[in-house]
Image (tube, rainbow, N blue to C red):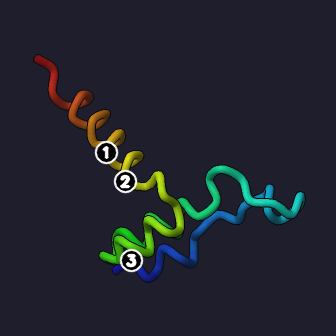
């Protein structure tokens, strides 16, 4: 199901033109690894993945739940 997502990944323009990794390098691959259930690899590719997912979860809850 998620194997097709790798065909649509965006290239990193900083890495392509300037030759160094930007702050977001590895984020797309880490999300795909996370969706595949490979949690350790996702953390190794992008250590901030779990804090970003937690933050995104809080945003979604806040968006849909209005007290």
Residue at the location (72% across, 61% down)?
Answer: 12
Which image quarter: residue 26?
A: bottom right
Q: Residues within 10 Å of mark 1 (few under 14, many from 20)?
A: few
Does residue 54 sit above or below 34 in this rendering? above
Residue at the location (43% across, 55% down)?
Answer: 49
Q: Position of residue 24 (x, y in %)?
A: 62, 53
**Distance between the Cα atoms at labels 3 and 2?**
19 Å
Residue at the location (44% across, 75% down)?
Answer: 41
Which image quarter: residue 58?
A: top left
Q: Quadrant of the C terminus?
A: top left
Q: Position of residue 31 (x, y in %)?
A: 44, 64
3 or 2: mark nearer the eye: 2
Callout 3–callout 2 Cβ contact below 8 Å: no
- The residue under label 2 is 50
First-in-chain label (3 vs 2): 3
- The residue under label 3 is 2
- 23 vs 32, nearest the viewer: 23
Q: Is 28 on the left or on the right of 61, as rendered?
A: right
- Element under disc 3: loop
Residue at the location (38% across, 46% down)?
Answer: 51
Q: Is 9 on the left or on the right of 22, as rendered?
A: left
**Distance between the Cα atoms at labels 2 and 1?**
6 Å
Residue occupying the far left of the picture: 67
- The residue under label 1 is 54
């Amino acid at each position: 199901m998620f194997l097709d997502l790798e065909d649509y990944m965006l290239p990193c323009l900083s890495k392509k033109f300037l030759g160094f990794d930007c702050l977001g390098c590895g984020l797309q691959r880490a999300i795909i690894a996370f969706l595949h259930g490979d949690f350790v690899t996702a953390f190794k590719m992008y250590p901030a993945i779990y804090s970003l997912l937690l933050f995104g979860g809080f945003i979604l809850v806040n968006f849909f739940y209005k007290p």
